[in-house]
Amino acid sequence: MRRDDRAIEGLPVRLVIALVVGVASLSVMLNMISGVQGLAVTELDARPTPEVTTPGEQDLSVTVVDPDGRPVAGATIVVTADTARLDGVATAQTGSNGTATVAVAPTLGPNREQGTLSISIKPPAGGQYADRRGNTRVLVVAE
């Protein structure tokens, strides 16, 4: 039995056939998904103005940009309390310039000198945008 080399005669042919079938299958799968756009996701960032504010009623302007700094229209800005207090949730949608104005009235807790407001972004529907990383927080400081 040690001298029987016939078993490996068919092995190279089988490997070539498996390789050809695998490449053909991969080609078909890639053609099927070639029309699908946006397997990559673009991360959005929020740029609040001002970044440091005081307690009380005021307008907060937030610009939503893509990684290249271009404004993104149709995104929804959500401002919530973090370590500073805020009655409810403030929302606004960005216009064509990528900016939204949100009315907020932050307050600080007892014996607190400062706190923060959290900003999150709901990307426009049907796009390849996402907001997975943390955004700039707005610092609220006592006067």
Image: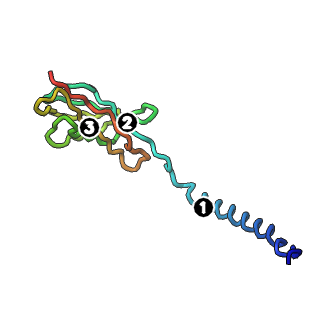
Decide which of 35, 63 is in the foreground and name it: 63
Q: In the displayed image of the protein, which residue is found farthest to the bottom? A: 1
* Residue 24 occupies quadrant: bottom right
Marks 3,1: beta carbons within 8 A: no
| Residue occupying image coordinates x 39% and y 39% | 44
On the image, the x and y values in percent for residue 133 come to 38, 40
Residue under label 3: 118
Q: CA distance from mark 3 to mark 1?
A: 43 Å
- Residue type marked 2: Asp
Taking the view exactly as shown, the residue that stands out farthest to the top is 143
**Mark 1 belongs to which amino acid?**
Met
| First along the sequence among labels 3 and 1 | 1
Depth check: 113 or 98 in front? Answer: 113
Residue at mark 2: 45
Q: Is residue 60 left or right of residue 136?
A: left
Task: Give the mark nearer the N terminus: 2 vs 1.
Answer: 1
Q: Secondary structure at mark 3?
A: strand
Categorize mark 1 by other alpha carbons within 10 Å: few (<14), some (14-19), many (20+).
few
For label 2, count other residues whose C-alpha is less than 10 Å away and answer few (under 14), some (14-19) or many (20+). many
Q: Which disc, if any, is residue 29? A: 1
